[in-house]
Image (tube, helix red, strand yellow):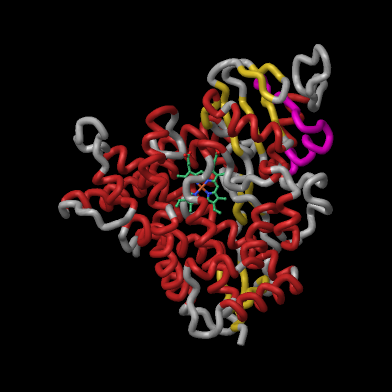
Amino acid sequence: MKPPFAAHPPGPRGLLAPVRNLFDLRRDPPGYFVDLARNHGPVSSFQLGARRLYFFAAPEGVREVLVTHAAVMHKGFLIRRVWESLVGVMGNGLLTSEGPFHDRQRRLVVPSFHRERLAGYAATMVEETAAHTSSWADGTTLNLAEVLSHLTLTIVGRALFGTDLGGSVGEISRAMSILLGLVERTRSPLAQWRYSRAMRAYHRARMQLDAVVGRLVAERRTGGEHDRGDLLSVLLLARDEETGAPGMTDTQVRDEVMTIMLAGHETTAAALAWTFHLLARHPAVETRLHAELDAVLPPGHTPTLADMPRLTYTRQVLSETMRLYPPAWLLVRRTIEPVTVAGYDLPKDATCLLSPYATQRDPHWFPEPERFQPDRWEEGQTAARPKHSYFPFGGGPRSCAGEAFAWLEGTILLAEIARRWRLAPAPGSPPPVPLASITLRPRDGMWMQARPRK
Ligand code: HEM
């Protein structure tokens, strides 16, 4: 609750604060929010140049922003032009649209992630993992982040759009890296110059992405679409509830496909890359994971949806990785009208920030927060924590539409790789550095060396 007469929540103050904040935030974006929470408590505010931003670190504030006041919060990003670039690529898709249009699209898309659909996706996940690791041999050195990004993209293409993205996978991945790299470009002192160069690369990447997705949609439209049971069929066959007329234009279908394709691969790939990084540094956790995998998945048995409840430790490992390295490390909202949040009156157009990275490192909920400890996710301990102390998938009406898909994919890929391979840091490779752009990914990839387990 705010102290009486306080106009703004506490935060870094002083004449130079608006400039110092900019500098500190650029130097270590996730660390900046950890420090804010530690030094200024559950609700804080700070100035970036002329703008005041509000940061809600405690579960109660997170709930108010994501759930209670969701109707007056629109999406955004810390750096406005990066958000505009994202909207440029994703158009009016699920991640970027607002209001009744968003709600209708979400109702259409979400059934594709229901349990009965997931069972079919599991087989694709297993097959593609086998295909993407088939060339590995004892001592193979690889950029695991890139392998996983290609693997998860291929899975989204096959499972949700019924297509083999094949040669386009490299192209899409490169375009995605350019998009995510835009944030980095805005941080350097030569920002404007570097940004204009990055924007040229961005426009090229956008055209490439458009061409890939345009081809995908056109092929299915001209083939006379019938229900193939995938998400693309749902989008193409959608009908207006009242008139029965085609519910979505090609542009709308394009925007949804682009959104799911981009939102649905890099995040899971980053979570898995950080998982293998942590496993390599925590042999006791790795040994326990192997024991579970050997017991639940004996040789010849490939994982299915039905095995998921028995892969409890595997899921705990993933949960703990996403606590320390949440792929969506910062969620941003802009108020569309004045609103009182956590006791503070916010004006219209105020920027509200939530950071799973910072909240999930609060020692109050997670003692010794820097330690990688999958045991924290045992049932009793999880139940004792408030709901929004952990929110790697967001919350409320804009929570991740692909969460169930992501858990299944994360668990299957981790199980299928870890039951056969041990991955250690590649000799001579520097430790991976987290790049906090729109996602939290290893900046220069993740170089590892594979060794067969048995
Ligand atoms: C570990 C993997 C993933 C993580 C951590 C993650 C995280 C998130 C988060 C935090 C949001 C909400 C952002 C906000 O509130 O500002 C979100 C939204 C979204 N995610 Fe995910 N996601 C993951 C995987 C996926 C997958 C696999 C798909 C699809 C196949 C997907 C599709 C979406 C979509 C469409 C939205 C927008 C939902 C809406 O606004 O209605 N995500 N994701």
- Is residue 270 depicted above or below 108 in this figure? below
Q: Quadrant of residue 427?
A: bottom right
Q: Where does the image place residue 416, in percent across and percent down from the top left?
A: 53, 73
The quarter of the image holding the N terminus is top right
- Is residue 123 depicted above or below 325 in this figure? below
Residue at 27% x, 38% y: name it. 248
Indicate left or right for 324 with 443 as reference: right
Indicate left or right for 383 with 451 as reference: right
| Residue bounds of the magenta highlight | 30-52
Residue at 57% x, 68% y: name it. 414
The answer to whether one can see residue 189 in this image is: yes
- Is residue 381 depicted above or below 355 in this figure? below
- Is residue 407 depicted above or below 429 in this figure? above
The answer to whether one can see residue 143 in this image is: no
Residue 244 or 65: which is nearer the viewer?
244
Q: Where does the image place residue 29, in percent across and percent down from the top left?
A: 69, 41
Please check the rendered image and state whether residue 51 is part of the magenta-colored stretch, yes or no.
Answer: yes
The quarter of the image holding the C terminus is bottom right
Q: Where does the image place residue 89, in percent across and percent down from the top left?
A: 40, 40
Q: Where does the image place residue 31, in percent across and percent down from the top left?
A: 74, 43
Please check the rendered image and state whether residue 246 is part of the magenta-colored stretch, yes or no.
Answer: no
Indicate left or right for 154 with 65 as reference: left
